[in-house]
Image (cartoon, rainbow, N blue to C red):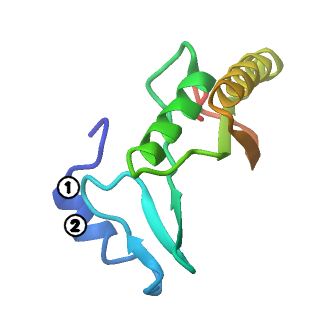
């Protein structure tokens, strides 16, 4: 199985294993729901989204920011912050990291967003980076 997990498996194995329920979650995990909406109170909601970019080899950093921003914007929210997890192959990581971060920085500036944190690591067994 390559690509998105089939909806039947999500229903069977994922959506019933989500930890504790929280009434502040207005829109949570479901088939076709790419961004969650959380009620912060006082008429304020936070829209959050996470996506892994696995199939692209060019413009990986740019795509990572734009895809997340797009899914947040489809909920009517202004994308402002970006959290990134970056997994690099255990070879040539300095050049790859520099290229990806150049793209992330440019895309975030283009959209008026800020990278507020994340995780980076080199991982054996990868043949290309995952953001």
56 left or right, relative to 75 = right
> Where is 21 relative to 9, above or below?
below
Q: State which quadrant residue 12 falls in.
A: bottom left
SS state under label 2: helix
Residue projecting furthest to the front: 43
Q: State which quadrant residue 44 falls in.
A: bottom right
Q: Residues within 10 Å of mark 2 (few under 14, many from 20)?
A: few
SS state under label 1: helix
Q: CA distance from mark 1 to mark 2?
A: 6 Å
- The answer to whether residue 60 is seen in the rendering is yes
> Where is 111 relative to 119, above or below?
above
Q: State which quadrant residue 123 falls in.
A: top right
Q: Residues within 10 Å of mark 1 (few under 14, many from 20)?
A: few
Residue at image x 67%, y 38%? 86
Q: Position of residue 2 (x, y in %)?
A: 30, 35
Q: Which mark is residue 88?
A: none
Residue projecting furthest to the right: 94
Q: How many marks?
A: 2
> Where is 29 relative to 64, above or below?
below
- The answer to whether residue 128 is seen in the rendering is no
Residue at image x 42%, y 50%? 76
Q: Which mark is residue 7?
A: 1
Residue at image x 51%, y 40%? 68
Q: Position of residue 127 (x, y in %)?
A: 57, 23
Residue at image x 45%, y 65%? 37
Closer to the camera in the image, 9 or 36: 36
54 left or right, relative to 96 = left
Disc 1, disc 2: CB below 8 Å? yes
Q: Position of residue 72 (x, y in %)?
A: 47, 47
Closer to the camera in the image, 2 or 33: 33
> Where is 51 relative to 40, above or below?
above
Give the residue pinned by disc 2. 11
């Amino acid at each position: 199985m390559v690509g998105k997990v089939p909806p039947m498996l999500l229903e069977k194995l994922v959506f019933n294993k989500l930890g504790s329920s929280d009434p502040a979650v207005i829109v949570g995990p479901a088939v076709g729901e790419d961004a969650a909406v959380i009620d912060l109170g006082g008429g304020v909601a936070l829209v959050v989204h996470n996506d892994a970019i696995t199939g692209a080899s060019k413009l990986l950093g740019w795509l990572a920011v734009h895809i997340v921003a797009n899914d947040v914007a489809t909920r009517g929210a202004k994308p402002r912050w970006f959290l990134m997890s970056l997994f690099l192959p255990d070879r040539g990581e300095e050049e790859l990291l520099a290229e990806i971060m150049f793209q992330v920085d440019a895309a975030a500036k283009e959209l008026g967003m800020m990278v507020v944190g994340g995780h980076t690591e080199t991982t054996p067994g990868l043949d290309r980076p995952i953001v």
